[in-house]
Image (cartoon, grey):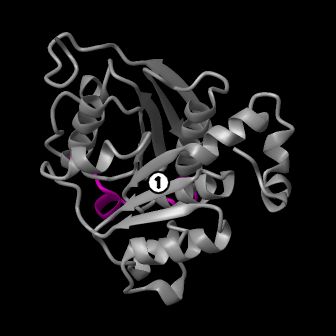
Amino acid sequence: MAFTEDEVERYARHLVLSEVGGPGQQALKRARVLIVGAGGVGAPAALYLAAAGVGTLGLIDHDAVALSNLQRQILFDTDDVGRPKVEAAATRLEGLNPHVAVQTFAERLTAENAVARIEDFDLVLDGTDDFETRFLVNAACVAAGRPLVSGALGRWSGQVAVFAGRPCYRCLVPQMPPDAETCARVGVVGALAGVVGSMAALEAIKVLTGAGQPLTGRLLLYDGLAGTARTVRIAPDPACPVCAG
């Protein structure tokens, strides 16, 4: 897979990295990544994956840009308020890197369409903020055999993990928490979205290129107030309804 002169210059800092180089950049160019939720996590992740040269980015989100999104969702600007998120995102991403093909799905991910959407991509990045959708994404990734990069945030803290088969996300979160917090209810510092979204994009790049040690089966917990981070291993749940057996 040859690169144009523009691509060679555009990806020059990747091409000189021993862990990426030409083969890794070609892997990125071949890759198809689906981002579920163009919000606090998905917005910065989409920017970095497009800039990195991921060949095809899929974006699925049923929502429109709201003024309150702009405090953290840097994929959008003031003129985008009221536009469908996937439409505004595609415009920005294609402007950032015309070598990236952007596929948009202005819809909610459901039990009926999840597997069909996910099996058409090589990797899924989930940045949604409700557990029902997270469970759907996880189950579809396990069924389709696709790696899942999961990012979440709230208040001043965030987390990132990579799931590839077993353990899966349901091993980490067996049941939907009864008092699940959302950014709309408890707030979130805007810059934290950039931290977590960038970490999620970095993990996706590592998985796609084979560089380093992705957070597969591990959970990175970041505390923005304390400026600390720690990583814990996720144990497979022998009774997991998704990946066990």
Q: Which residue is mark 1?
A: 41
Q: Residue furthest front?
A: 1
Q: Would residue 155 be visible to someone looking at this image?
A: yes
Point out the stretch of residues depicted in magenta.
180-193
Q: Position of residue 98 (x, y in %)?
A: 65, 68
Report the quarter where the N terminus lies: top right
Q: Is residue 188 magenta?
A: yes
Q: For the point 58% across and 44% down, which residue is it? A: 30
Please tell me which residue lies in front, 70 or 215. 215
Q: Is residue 195 left or right of residue 106?
A: right
Q: For the point 85% across and 59% down, which residue is it? A: 5
The three-letter code of the residue at mark 1 reads Val
Q: For the point 19% across and 15% down, which residue is it? A: 244
Report helix, strand or loop for mark 1: loop
Q: Would residue 225 be visible to someone looking at this image?
A: no
Please tell me which residue lies in front, 180 or 141. 141
Q: Position of residue 35 (x, y in %)?
A: 42, 53
Q: For the point 87% across and 38% down, which residue is it? A: 16
Report the quarter where the C terminus lies: top left
Q: Position of residue 103 (x, y in %)?
A: 43, 63
